[in-house]
Image (cartoon, rainbow, N blue to C red):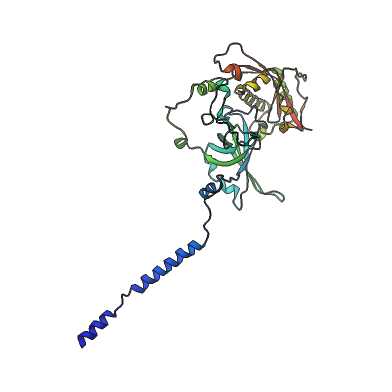
Amino acid sequence: MLQRQVKESANQIVDPNADIEKQDDITHDAIVQQQKKQPQPPTIEDETQADGGIFLKRVGTIRSIYRLCVGTPRQGLLCPNARGCIELDKIGDSSSSSSVIGLEQYSHIWIIFVFHLNTKSSNPKRIKSKIAPPALGGKKVGIYATRSPHRYNPIGITLCKIDRIEKIAKTKHTEERIQIHISGLDLVDGTPVLDIKPFVPTYDSVPMDVRLPSWVEGGLATKRNVVIGQDALDDLTVILEKDKNALQFYGQRYGEKTVQETVEYAVECIRQVLAIDVRSNFQTKKAREGKFQAERAKRLQGAAAANEGRGTNAVASDVCTQQLDNLLIQYVVDETSDTKRSTSVGSGAEDTVTVVSIKLLEEE
């Protein structure tokens, strides 16, 4: 009898951890069920699977010496004297000033941007997979073998030098603003910036055994001869003697101490830009015939050239114009008869450019 009672009592003994484990199972199951009920925030992958597109918000806007696409260099570092800045947007409740902490420790940045002035085709289904780069003299290659702005997604990347980062204090009527002043840029004024990344040579450079197509190497090695006439130098000197702040990105505000220093730095920028201004066959023909006038462009409407220089104000029928900063550059293109590269015939890469006058662009 006693043995039977002991056995029954033993059978009734419960593991002290059993209730805890059971409770843990219940809690875990409840959490899982609760998570299933609550909607999870969508990922970028979810968005692309839903409609094949990704929504991107700009983080800033470019302000630069270029207002027109035509004439803007194909790569900024080929024109180290070209200047501009990135005006950062305030996104949500983020702090623009906090977002650039530590950035001043880098010398260069990558800028990811949108080619916002690309013209759209009337037929959205017509997407070109091949293009003819000017350096190829009319021959075509695949879009992914070029740096053409006309791409399936109009996104570009460029490398610029950081000159300084400026914090503009908040006022009664304006929010705090951050400007990243840069040089060696190839971006048109108003370009939307998608992202900024610091340049790190270890990550972003490759060993010297780099392979390039011959047409790219040849194009990089070819520059137009640019002559700055004395009348043009006199014009710019007069403009700056009258107003030292006549230019938006050159002068005392940007480190030049004298009018002469400003003239020299700005003229070198003009020389750099015109030396690599390689265009399509159609645009090259217009330039050689003096039929390209920047002031006629829609983006320059409302601006007029002031006659303030010591040089001649007469504009010959074969003179082209190009806008840089607040200046209208007047120049003549002479086709060379002795080209070293056959593809230069159509692109004008070996033509001679003579700057005959420089005018100040003023708002009417």
Judged left or right of residue 175, residue 207 is left
- Residue 242, how many percent across, how many down? 75, 28
Judged left or right of residue 233, residue 46 is left
In the image shown, does 131 or 287 lie closer to the viewer? 131
- Residue 342, how many percent across, how many down? 55, 15
Give me the residue at 37% from left, 72% from top: 20
Decide: is 49 above or below 275: below
Residue 197 visible in the picture: yes
Q: Residue furthest top?
A: 337
- Residue 252, how many percent across, how many down? 67, 33
- Residue 99, how many percent across, how many down? 56, 47
Judged left or right of residue 268, residue 16 is left
In the image shown, does 182 or 141 lie closer to the viewer? 141
In the rendered image, the quadrant that contains the C terminus is: top right
Q: Quadrant of residue 162?
A: top right
Total labels: the figure holds 0
Give me the residue at 62% from left, 30% from top: 82
Decide: is 194 above or below 355: below
In the rendered image, the quadrant that contains the N terminus is: bottom left
Q: Residue furthest right?
A: 364
Residue 228 visible in the picture: no
Decide: is 173 above or below 120: below
